Image: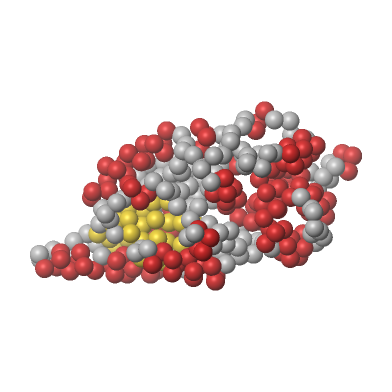
Amino acid sequence: MIYCCETQNAPQNRSWVQERYNNLPEEVCAVQIEGLSWFPGHMTKTKRMIAAEIGHMDAVCEIVDARIPQSSRNPDVDELTAGKPRMIVLNRVDQADPAETKKWAAAFRAQGYAVLEANAKGGAGTEKFAAAVRELLKEKLAAYAEKGQVGRTIRVMVLGIPNVGKSTFINKVAKRKTARAEDRPGVTRSKQWVPVDATLELLDTPGILWPKFDDTEVGKRLAFTGAIKDDVLDIEELACYLMDYLALHYADVLRERYKIDVEEGDSGYDLLEKAGRKRGFLMRGAQVDTERMARILLDEFRGGKLGRFTLETAEDCGK
């Protein structure tokens, strides 16, 4: 379970952040999420809408973040869409480890999903979507043809958690800006029908998370990639944990990007402070503005400026 706190009322000074980060009990995740803020009424409404519309769909396309392919899957989707042909789009492959992306694609195919790798922002892979859908539904389309229903419109529901690039993907597939897209969670708030061609329509749905993260690591990964709104998080704590992860798995990236020494025993806060000092983010008394550095770190990570990372492996998630 992820524990909650009201971060806006917390004292924002370096000693408080450092003390809190260093002394949290091991069983408590320091990604502090105010549950009611990230599971508002529109998400409950969306679940009802999916249940009401699913019977009219020919297939379901789930957009996931290739950096966190399992963590960015809403566990409720399988139940909500049971019995429908499924496709998984691994989006943002340009920011993920290519070798790990191939392993994830193979793992999903082994589970019976059609898989498409894409970079919706740049457009790569999106041109293959319509053909991939028709391949997924080739038996159903053949059955329609036998009944004289050649050219019958295919309807595909597109699902995904907030800020996974769902609306951007739809706009690229449709070759027009029909779905509202921004690089922040919670932009799509109602269903939208989007025509792709004469016989293919997509139902864009609002992104939904689930009410509770039983695995604290899932919560961290979602927060790292921006699926949870930053304004319900303590940004400095989140950045400390990201620094921890990068130091453990990609220390050379930190050394090269921020020109800092990554030494054994350095905490995430130590590294955040080192990077902020190197960048010249100093306040009165030569204290490092760690909040500013935290936002820079997260922005650069989310924007792919630090490199290509996959934060979970198919092998580990399959255990």
In the image, is 311 to the left or to the right of 111?
A: right
Tell me what residue is drawn at x 41 percent, y 38 percent.
43
The reply to whether residue 235 is in sight is no
Count of numbered circles on the image? 0
Q: Quadrant of the N terminus?
A: top right
Image location of residue 3, percent across then percent down: 58, 36
Furthest residue in direction right, as rendered: 285
Furthest residue in direction top, as rendered: 9
The quadrant where residue 303 appears: bottom right
In the image, is 266 to the left or to the right of 134?
A: right
The reply to whether residue 40 is in sight is yes
Image location of residue 151, percent across then percent down: 18, 65
**Camera-side residue of 198 and 57:** 57
Q: Is residue 234 above or below residue 157?
A: above
Image location of residue 39, percent across then percent down: 47, 37
**Camera-side residue of 215 and 69:** 215
Tell me what residue is drawn at x 36 percent, y 36 percent.
45
Image location of residue 170, percent across then percent down: 40, 57
Tell me what residue is drawn at x 32 percent, y 39 percent.
48
The quadrant where residue 173 appears: bottom left
Q: Is residue 61 above or below residue 189?
A: below
Tell me what residue is drawn at x 88 percent, y 43 percent.
286
Furthest residue in direction front, as rendered: 319
